[in-house]
Image (cartoon, rainbow, N blue to C red):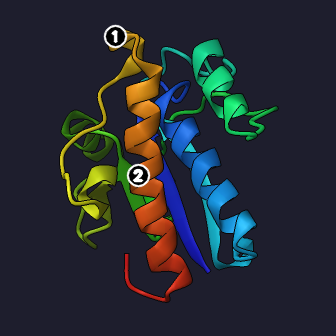
Amino acid sequence: MIKILFICHGNICRSPMAEFCLKDLLAKANASSLAYISSAATSAEELGNPVYPPAKRKLREQGIDCAGKTARQITRSDYEKYDIIVAMERCNLRNTERITGPDRDRKFRLLMDYTDTPGGVADPWYTGDFDEAWRDIEKGCRAMAERIIGGKKL
């Protein structure tokens, strides 16, 4: 079983959307047992807060439930616990490294690097465009799910 941690700034929009999207994709493929998936923030701003309502609505539109998810911050020990740490954008990786220390085991990735359009997922907290964020997140998670199900390295 691979252990995956999604990261964004506050853990109320993009990273929980990715967490629950990938969980849903694997569940629909009867492959949930192949991965343990969670998400966290690099900041402490939203600790304990639920998924942001527009992100929750976007998930619900897809038939995905994120009930009970609250924001948490990544910890130094998460680096050892997870096999791969997948961020939404480069600044998330820099901030993650400040908390966990250097990426000595090369665990850090960007979600969109699994697609044919590498780069970052724009933060809908600032853009207001949850549709665009969802399209990118779903595309990245589909690519990850295909690799996981196919037994390929992430």
Q: Amino acid at mark 1?
A: Tyr
Instruction: Examine the image and state in which quarter residue 12 appears.
Output: top right
Please indicate whether residue 143 sits to the left or right of residue 110 in the image.
right
Q: Which mark is residue 83?
A: none
Residue 78, visible in the rendered structure: no
Please indicate whether residue 114 sits to the left or right of residue 76 in the image.
left
Is label 1 or label 2 in front?
2
Precedes in sequence: disc 1 or disc 2: 1
Residue on which disc 1 sits: 126
Q: Nearer the viewer, residue 59 or 8?
A: 59
Instruction: Examine the image and state in which quarter residue 27 appears.
Output: bottom right
Q: CA distance from mark 1 to mark 2?
A: 21 Å
Contact, mark 1 vs mark 2 (Cβ under 8 Å): no
Residue drawn at 59 percent across, 32 percent down:
72
Vertical relation: 84 (above or below) 64: below
Q: Which mark is residue 139?
A: 2
Quarter of the picture holding the C terminus: bottom left
Q: Nearer the viewer, residue 61 or 90?
A: 61
Q: Position of residue 142 (x, y in %)?
A: 48, 61
Residue drawn at 75 percent across, 40 percent down:
63
Which class describes the residues within 10 Å of circle 1: few (<14), some (14-19), or many (20+)? few
Vertical relation: 6 (above or below) 79: above
Vertical relation: 49 (above or below) 74: above
